[in-house]
Amino acid sequence: MISFLLTLKRLLSGLWGAFKLKNFQVLFVLILLLLLSGTLFYTKEEGLSVIDALYFCIATLSTVGHPDFVPQTDLGKIFTMIYIVVGSGLFLGMAGYIAYAIIKSNLREDNQERRNRFNR
């Protein structure tokens, strides 16, 4: 449990650090717009509920996939192909910025500990 809490703390500090970067903010807004547009599309075109459509969008963007849903219309299949290519790149870019911020935060903590040991 302690390990989980420490990992969660690192993730949240990484997110906090990433939000300070302008490029991350832009990627975050683009991801939100992509999720919104995908959710609207799948509710209108494929007849999914809002929650199911949002779940499918997040599962698709995170490259996990959804085992039970396959778009039924040709337009839905074409949209999904474009959505996967564009969305995966944006999602992975955002994950890269979060990883960068976590590593930067860890390095900062390590440097702080070294300074504290040196000053003793």
Image (spheres, rainbow, N blue to C red):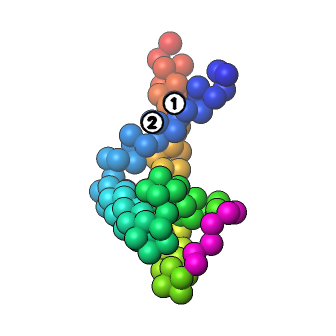
Q: Residue at coordinates 47% horizontally, 68% vertically from top-left?
A: 47
The location of residue 25, given as percent across then percent down, is 32, 55
Q: Residue at coordinates 52% horizontally, 39% vertically from top-left?
A: 11
- In space, the residues marked 2 and 1 are separated at their CA atoms by 6 Å
The location of residue 44, given as percent across then percent down, is 40, 70
In the rendered image, which quarter contains the N terminus? top right
Indicate which disc residue 9 carries: 1
- Residue type for callout 1: Lys
Residue 47 shows in the view? yes
- Residue type for callout 2: Ser
The answer to whether 65 appears left or right of 39 in the picture is: right
Q: Residue furthest front?
A: 47
Q: Residue furthest right?
A: 67
Q: Which residue is mark 2?
A: 13
Indicate which disc residue 58 carries: none
Q: Secondary structure at mark 2?
A: helix
107, above or below 30, in the image: above
Q: In the rendered image, which quarter is residue 32 located in? A: bottom left
Q: Secondary structure at mark 1?
A: helix
76, above or below 58, in the image: below
Crowding at dot 1, Cα within 10 Å, few <14 / some 14-19 / many 20+, comes out as few
The stretch in magenta equals: 67-72
Circles 2 and 1: CB atoms closer than 8 Å: yes
Q: Nearer the viewer, residue 82 or 16?
A: 82
